[in-house]
Image (spheres, coloured by chain):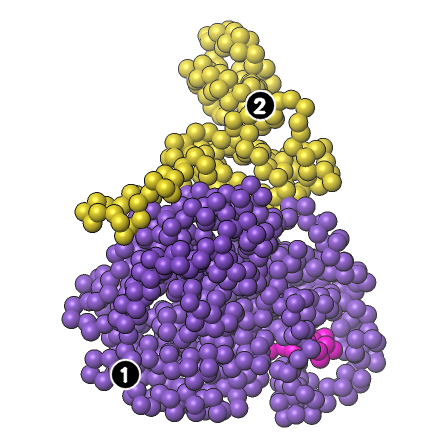
Amino acid sequence: MTMTKGGAGKPDARARHSHVPADGTAHADAVERAQREMLHEGPSSSAVRAGSGAGAATVGAAGSRGSRPRIGADVVCEAVLRQGVDVVFSYPGGVILPLYDILADYPELRHVLVRHEQGGAHAADGYARATGRVGVCIGTSGPGATNLVTGIATAQLDSIPLVAITGNVPSALIGKDAFQEIDINGITLPMTKHNYLVRDANDLPRVFAEAFHIARSGRPGPVHVDITKDALQQVTDAEHPDDETVRAGLPGFKPNLHGHYRQLKAAAAEIQAAKRPVILAGHGVLHSQAEAELLALAEKASIPIAWTLLGIGAVDERHPLAYGFMGMHGWKHVNRAIQSADLLVALGMRFDDRVTGNVRTYAPYARIVHVDIDPAEIGKNVAVEVPIVGDAKRVLTALLPMVEPVERETRAEYLDQLAEWKRDSEASSWHGSGAWRDGQLSADYVVQRIGELTDHEAIYVADVGQNQMWLARYAGFRHPNTHVSSGGLGTMGFAVPAAMGAALGEPNRETWAIVGDGGFQMTSQELMTLVQDRIPVKIALFDNKKLGMIRQWQEIIYAGNYHSAHLMGPDYLKLAEAYGVPAVKASKPDEVDAAIRFAQGVDGPALVWFEIAEEQNVFPMMPAGKGLSDLIEHWDGEQS
Amino acid sequence: MSAQQAAPATAAAPAHSAPAHTSPPARALPGTGETRLHRLVALVVDKPGVLNRVASLMRARNFNIDSLAVSRTDQAGLSRMTISLHGDDVAVEQAAKQLYRLIDVVKVQDVTSEPTVEHELALVKIRVTESNRADLLIVIELSRGRILDLGPEAVIVEVSGSEAEVDAFIGVVRTFGIKELVRTGAVVMARGAGSIEESVKK
């Protein structure tokens, strides 16, 4: 039933634990010291605990796991560990303190103290995207909980498995407008896959088992668990349910994984009849780990693969049938292929408006086979000929034997034409010299060099705006889950905290955050988390002293009315220095490689301040409301 | 989805062979745009907050509920909602699919095109005077209304039946003056031996 990317096929990623500091290291000491300070404890936690534990009657006041009653807060830690999660991103507060009071009893559960709950939610999101495991973030009631909301919404729009835990005021105070009380359940209701308010610790094992099951099964998504303070403190011996019991307790949650046989036959017939088919690979391919099956279908029937923003990495971009990134800032050749296609085979994608533009003019000659695990996505934005509800991997596995092989030669005319379009489109709007206009540093070049100097093996975390589109177009992706981007919600400030989570989840890969000066200034407080927890995120700060995408829209759509597009920023070298992050600046093409290598050489977080051209646009661009055939490639003397 | 199938692939000319001066065919949007009243029956887990989830979803997805009736079923732990809404068939199908995404929604059925019995109940407080009391009582009698409270200046009448029957009664008594009106909203049940409740039994 479950669809985690880190499933049975992979070696147990948890066994690595290489991001958990080893005992006795300076890092471990720093983490422990920070935890002690937070708990207002003295120098030796074990001594203090032994001393105060003896006479303390209050549950949870002190003591190790074995020598005190098990309380609701213990269930939270147990449940998280049972689910294979080894790090949580959290911020304390009044009502969640019972959890913090026992966290030190779970040394195998790493706790990262973020600097803002939004950072915690994004970090858990980045962890989930990089690993396929469920990300966990924790906050207190009221403002702690509302600060998580942007991160939860980000996960919801991109179908990211996340469990967000909040404390709430004691159940007796609920509804009384108590200090830091807000109806957070009511707030997260429309932006989660499901949510819970728990007032009784005996419910916690079931609720957490359900929460994780729901978060990662079927179409993944965030689940919010709100727990009253008294439930966190309540003694309980309730046992964790097994998977069977969990499923039986959720009669309304039965994801349909297998495509309908008749529809699969219909899809195979469509593929056989098509002369100009294009596969559209979306996030669902990555969620279901269907990369091999995707490639098998493409190769068997000689069909080129286009991908959505979140479908990046579904196929190695070097593959001859890997055609490119589609949509508003996608490649012209890709959009052209879609507009001339007679069949779209859409796998785990949802025909978002950034992909289709004006639906009336979208792929006018194409019939559509649409595979998605969520029935509600099929027929929502576009009418389709062959709807298939199911998990992409299972559907493709069942579909493959039904598809007749088509040799490349059979499609030679079509594929040759596509190849020609690709050559044309890749040559335009590209600045191979690294210079834009009067020698200013060109962002596309910087992104490409980051990709190349990391051998395309890093995890690249985008922020939102021009930097996000440059990354999607020019970094060159080889592997699934190495591209992390807030696609649906488009959350500025996402990159640095999400990279924090990705780096902890995949410690064997280098992690780069690609972030503009706007997004960076939204969540730069997490620099301190990177330093305190020694999380080796490399930050590529693309500073054009602008809200670049805003400026681009204002230039092209709002007649050059640049209100609020200009953005002041600090001296980022001084800022980084103040946080203790090694940093370097690059302003010219010939400084780029050395700057990237400098960051790679730092053992820990590092920042590269790229002063890029201030007025460079991302082309091509499909204006909102227009269609894929209305791409703008140049603007008023712009040397695109 | 079958309702708005495009032309078969063989009939569609790929762009590269299409004459440059002809504009490509417009892609059909989902749905016909022809709205009608739909009845959705939903079985949901009987838990606090489920009504809120359903109402919130319908609001967020831009569906306007005409009426909503909720009650327990004969199965412990299951509640039943009858949701009446206007929309074209595809839009209402989308509403049903969105409802399915709620973890607490167990089963959704659009019974609009099925043979059903449908009933709702209304209480009407009608203004009455010495001079027209007799006329009103005759109207109530003929409409099979039931008087629940008879006062010197007003009567409360219970009337039940299909939505149209209740509408008709209200239309007739409006001339007397309606002081207050409450309707439960329709509840429906499919005719025959089939049972939505039995269909979800384990």
Pick the residue in front: A145 or B46.
B46
Q: What element carries label 1?
A: loop
Residue drawn 53% across the image and 64% down it: A291
Residue A433 tag number: 1
- The color chain A is rendered in: purple
Pick the residue in front: B4 or B36.
B4
Asked if residue A518 can be seen in this view, the reply is yes
Pick the residue in front: B195 or A200.
B195
Pick the residue in front: A607 or A171.
A607
Q: In which quarter of the image is the N terminus of chain A?
A: bottom right
Residue at the spot of label 2: B116
Q: Compared with residue A466, is residue A380 higher up or lower down, i.e. above or below?
A: above
Residue kind at label 1, given as amino acid type: Ser
Q: Residues within 10 Å of mark 1 (few under 14, many from 20)?
A: few
Q: Compared with residue A19, is residue A336 higher up or lower down, i.e. above or below?
A: above
Residue kind at label 2, given as amino acid type: Thr
- Residue A478: x and y in percent read 48, 73
Q: Give the alpha-carbon distance from disc 2 to disc 1, as whole Å.
A: 72 Å
- Residue A305: x and y in percent read 43, 61
Q: Mark 2 lies on which chain?
A: B
Residue A440 in the figure: left or right of residue B93: left
Q: Give the range drawn in magenta.
A: A101-114
The image quadrant that residue B111 belongs to is: top right
Supply the letter of whichever chain is yellow: B
